[in-house]
Amino acid sequence: MRYDIIIIGSGAGGGTIAWALRDCGARILIIERGDFLPQEDDNWSPEAVFQGAAYKTRETWEDVSDARSFIPGVHYYVGGNTKVFGAALPRFREKDFDALEHEGGTSPAWPVTYQEMEPYYVRAENLYRVHGNPGEDPTEPARSAHYPFDAVPHEPELEALSSQLRANGLHPFHLPLGLDLRPGGHCIRCHTCDGFPCRVLAKSDAEVCCVRPALEHANVSILTSALALRLIKHGKRIHAVETRHRGSTRLLYADTFIVACGAVNSAALLLNSEPGGLANGSGLVGRHYMVHNNTAMCAVRPRKNRTVFQKTLSVNDFYWSGPDWPWPMGNLQIIGKVQAPMLKMTRQRVPISLLHAIACRSMDWWVMSEDLPCRNNRVTITSSGRVQVHWIPNNMVTHRRFIRECSSLMRRIGYPLVFAETMGIATNSHQCGTLRFGTDPGTSVLDPYCRSHDVPNLYAVDSSFFPSSAAMNPALTIAAMALRTADYLQVNL
């Protein structure tokens, strides 16, 4: 049971780095606490996925702010949360890597520049089959290559919406998406993509694009249904991980360990590994937890919206500032078509027939602003190892103003009714920041290659390394950094 490399987690970080290291000759084991997600009818059932939470974890975390338990928005399967993500794969903007002033505080600089990350963004876009159209978005960063595939075209309702937005002085663009829409590809552009597993494996998730291809190599293997309990250190280095696998506890040994459990669970693993936390010389393991400030918005008009595959459009005109607002506001993007059973989750008392009438006439949006890093927003564990989340949203003056601006925009373009629901602590699909990277061991947990300052054979390649959250979907940046870390590892193994 000895390996050269053990990767704990198989999502956007762990899956990508397993793929990137598949040819290096090392004996690699992926440990995943879940199993392969089954391809079944429930994959495409809004009742099963949303009302029944068929694929969501049943575990609870504790919200320390009001001493209540909640079920987090995480999914434990091979591929991690990418199994149900909306496949939006944008790059962070150049200024996202610099210190940036917000109304609510400062978003700190990263220890790497966009220029250093750009070639890895190119590789990640090719690996995850990203469809996009450069040149439409005025905030788009410099590119050294075209997207590997042309943008997913708008359906007629979205094309009309795009024209209305342009008539109002905005610059809507095709949202970069990871889908198998190649000639002969599997994607059928259904209405159950965003938030659902893909029954035909046409979504560019980490299992499909990375884990399965990596497992075709004899030196790469996977242990599913195996929960990593703690990392065991001998001297200055980790030499084993203790796992619980199908009811029994076992030790697995390796020369190098890569943690990619998600920002919350990676921090929890290190905190569980030794008193005071493993690799915690800075005292920052678990701190600076971020999740974005998110609001779902349904804009409703009398005429029906007959769109099937809706998630193709985004707007960044408010990304760096807004009307009479000099600070960054955020990103506005269409989400997958909302259906009545999905609305029923938050509107239990509303008749399903009325929710159906609303869903048939709505244009559905995700309003996303940056959640700034705060030392006291953090992950801790109880004496029994249970996860606790301390999170008080910040930068909310900007977010509320952004919601009002977007609501006003919707009314101007012909949607008289606008309903908004701001997400809480349980909506944590964009979690990040708990093992921030940097050049100073006193102010960061990881170095600029995601290697622990304190433990030389420990790396972390999920979104825990983020020093800031920006206001963009994080998956492509996670994958790009995993590719960069893999290059560093292959030179330094």
Image (tube, rainbow, N blue to C red):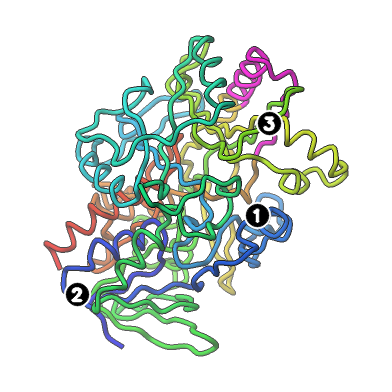
Left or right, 43 with reference to 14: right
What's the amino acid at mark 3? Cys
Q: Nearer the viewer, residue 121 or 96?
A: 121
> Dividing the image into 4 quarters, which one contains the C terminus?
bottom left
Question: Mark 1, residues whose alpha carbon is within 10 Å: few (<14), some, or many (≥20)?
Answer: some
Question: Residue tagged by mark 3?
Answer: 298
Q: Residue at x 56, y 40 (%)?
A: 309
Question: Mark 2, residues whose alpha carbon is within 10 Å: few (<14), some, or many (≥20)?
Answer: some
What's the amino acid at mark 2? Ala
What's the amino acid at mark 1? Asp
* Picture coordinates of residue 388, whole percent (x, y): 59, 60
Left or right, 88 with reference to 450: right
Q: Give the mark, 1 or 2, whose residue is nearer the N terminus.
A: 2
Question: Residue tagged by mark 2?
Answer: 26
Q: Give the mark, 2 or 3, whose residue is nearer the N terminus.
A: 2
What is the CA distance from the residue labelled 2 to the residue labelled 3?
49 Å
Q: Secondary structure at mark 2?
A: loop
Q: Which residues are magenta?
A: 400-422
